Amino acid sequence: DGGITQSPKYLFRKEGQNVTLSCEQNLNHDAMYWYRQDPGQGLRLIYYSQIVNDFQKGDIAEGYSVSREKKESFPLTVTSAQKNPTAFYLCASSIVGLAGTMGEQYFGPGTRLTVT
Amino acid sequence: KNQVEQSPQSLIILEGKNCTLQCNYTVSPFSNLRWYKQDTGRGPVSLTIMTFSENTKSNGRYTATLDADTKQSSLHITASQLSDSASYICVVSPKEIYSGGYQKVTFGIGTKLQVIP
């Protein structure tokens, strides 16, 4: 069953704790992305990675960190520095086309993080 | 600033009826436009992708149109079904590639469609 998986589906944490969200893909895609989705807003890019051991900040990277040690995996850590971490987090992957163009993004099922 | 605006924000229709969702964008120069369907609590799934030169593209009961001159796209759903209840998101990609190799796409907020029996 090919695709992109995220775990867990629901995550609850106390304020001040770091938490890591998992994202795995077996589509052999080079690029992976993390987005945050809040009610009334479009998806916002947190981090992206086009190649192993390299990643770039997106529009709202503050309070988040990532790693890309394997092509298949792109975990996201929500740190205690993130002021408003409660949200729906989506991971995506895509091929990297000619001249760096982005192929179709395939999204995971998402992780809903609640911090109290 | 690149923007994607979708309308209406929400829509309720009777099962079997047709509906049209709108997407206006300011992204320029433009590369392609995608429509995604997102069920509640799930990740978005691609419905169609249209490039600058395409005017219409169909995927079953979904038909997307594009007017690159007016920077408008629409998604028409024919003979709606209860399973069409979802948010529909318009996503626009620019032509330029930013440093770091990222083609910065812009997501609309989405239109929440509810199909009732």
Image (cartoon, coloured by chain):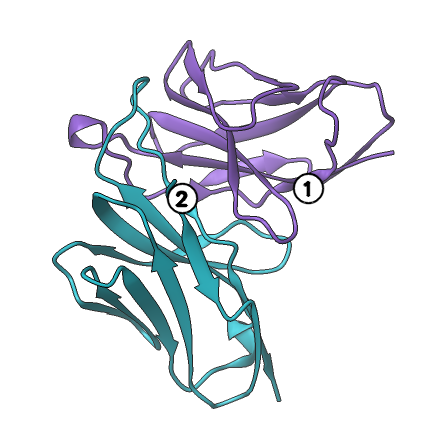
Chain colours: A purple, B cyan
Q: Secondary structure at mark 2?
A: strand
Real-space Cα distance between discs 2 and 1?
25 Å
Q: Position of residue A14 (x, y in %)?
A: 87, 27
Picture quadrant of residue B11: bottom right
Task: Decide if residue B105 is on the left or right side of residue A57.
Answer: left
Q: Nearer the viewer, residue A2 or A71?
A: A71
Picture quadrant of residue A114: top right
Give the residue at mark 2.
B106
Q: Give the residue displayed 40% in from the left and 34% down from the top.
A: A93
Q: Secondary structure at mark 1?
A: loop
Give the residue at mark 1.
A9
Amino acid, disc 1 = Lys
Q: Position of residue B68 (x, y in %)?
A: 20, 59
Amino acid, disc 2 = Thr
Q: Quadrant where the N terminus of chain B lies?
A: top left
Chain of the residue under the numbered disc 2 shown in the image: B
Q: Residues within 10 Å of mark 1 (few under 14, many from 20)?
A: some
Q: Residues within 10 Å of mark 2 (few under 14, many from 20)?
A: many
Residue A27 shows in the view:
yes
Residue A2 shows in the view:
no
Picture quadrant of residue B46: bottom left
Q: Specify the farthest residue to the left.
A: B53
